[in-house]
Amino acid sequence: MAADNQRGALFRPLVPNQHSRVTYAELFFDLVFVFAVTQISHTLLGRFTPLEALQTTLLFLAVWWVWVYTAWITNWLNPELTPVRVLLFSLMLGGLVLSTSIPKAFESRGLWFALAYAAMQVGRTTFLLASVPRTQPPIRMNAIRILIWLSTSAVFWILGGLAEGHSRLAFWAVALAIEYLSPAARFWIPKYGASSIEDWAVEGGHMAERCAGFIIIALGESIVVTGATFADLAWTTETVSAFVSAFVAAIAMWWIYFHKGAEAGSEQISRSTEPGRLARLAYTYLHLPIVAGIILSAVADELVLTHPADHSDLKTVLSAIGGPLLFLVGTILFKHTIRGWLQLSHCAGIVVLAILAWFAAELSPLMLSILTTAIMIMVAAWESISLRSAAAAPQSEATSA
């Protein structure tokens, strides 16, 4: 019984009507993923063929998944305690191996990538299982379910690391499919079935803040890449214009996500009677296209900065249009989940970007960047004005009454 109580003590204390704050240990852990995001964007920049883009997408999905699973675990466990901190620091080491292996993951470092990923996923879940007291069988059973699914996918990760070429891609695609389907299937296993939605209770404010922090990581990486590239270039009218356009676009993305959306999401998940279901959909799955859009936009910024007046090739068009498009699609779905209605400003932005794609090849990279930035500014301004008007209407009615 004493051992069970000691293991149970690793969980965060539940304080009614109070958010569990994001700890310094979690923020320290996130630093590894600043590097991982940089590796992803640089890898995509240098390898933009269809096959290489597919490979990089797979690596991005893996990076996001290992991070978001850690966010779930630290929502339950208390990072202020030494054993949990040691877990996070161990995961940081694995994350560094994972991140440094990204550029050559489909070449000489595939096994290193696979071993680091599998060790992080399985090791972290084993720690969770060991932390659950036997007096809490539903939570313990949930940890066992997760461990079985992740152990199954780990086999395919390692097989892929040992394989080469298309076989590696196939094995890793199967591994990712297993992991991405598992939460939707609620980690169903034979004999014991699926977990209940009550088993996925989370502290909503903490989960929302953790995912918002990853958005900051992606935006920060975009600004760092833009600044580093601009510093090495001759400061001409074209490069300065491209730099300003990239910076303003990053601000517009921040505004669209954080001005009202992040706060509304935090409030909604905190009040929800099923925070686990909302966290799984809005934060685990729907933040994927948001982050992917930011990373793809960072690739476009670097392409535009280095060749602002050249012809817009396919790589420039796909990244310059695809980045904002992915971001808006992810954001509108995220906000629909928390608000229950589609944001008209985001719909308009998506439509205008789709129209721009037809003419993008005829524009210079700089003009393409300026136009996409203008579209993002339009979306941000439209949403802010519409939400302010909607908030002012009830107040006006109350005053007149």
Image (cartoon, grey):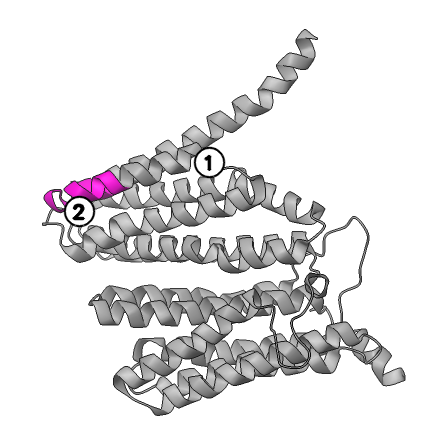
Three-letter amino acid code at disc 2?
Answer: Pro
Q: Secondary structure at mark 1?
A: loop
Residue 170, position as x, y percentages in the image = 33, 80
Question: Does residue 38 sit above or below 324 in this rendering?
Answer: below
Residue 362, position as x, y percentages in the image = 10, 43
Main SS of residues in magenta: helix
321 on left or right of 217? left
How packed mark 1 is, by other alpha carbons closer than 10 Å (few <14, some 14-19, many 20 or more), is some
Residue that sits furthest to the right in the current view? 1
Magenta-span inclusion, residue 31: no
Q: Quadrant of residue 40?
A: bottom left
| Residue 185 at least partly seen | yes
Please tell me which residue is depicted at 74% across the width and 79% down the height of the picture.
131
How many numbered marks, from 0 up? Answer: 2
Please tell me which residue is depicted at 50% across the width and 66% down the height of the picture.
31
Say which label, 1 or 2, has the lower sequence index: 1
Foreground: 113 or 29?
113
Please tell me which residue is depicted at 76% across the width and 73% down the height of the picture.
138
Residue that sits furthest to the bottom in the current view? 162
Q: Which region shows up in magenta?
A: 354-370
The residue to which callout 2 is attached is: 365
The residue to which callout 1 is attached is: 343
For the residues marked 1 and 2, what is the alpha-carbon distance in whole angstroms?
29 Å
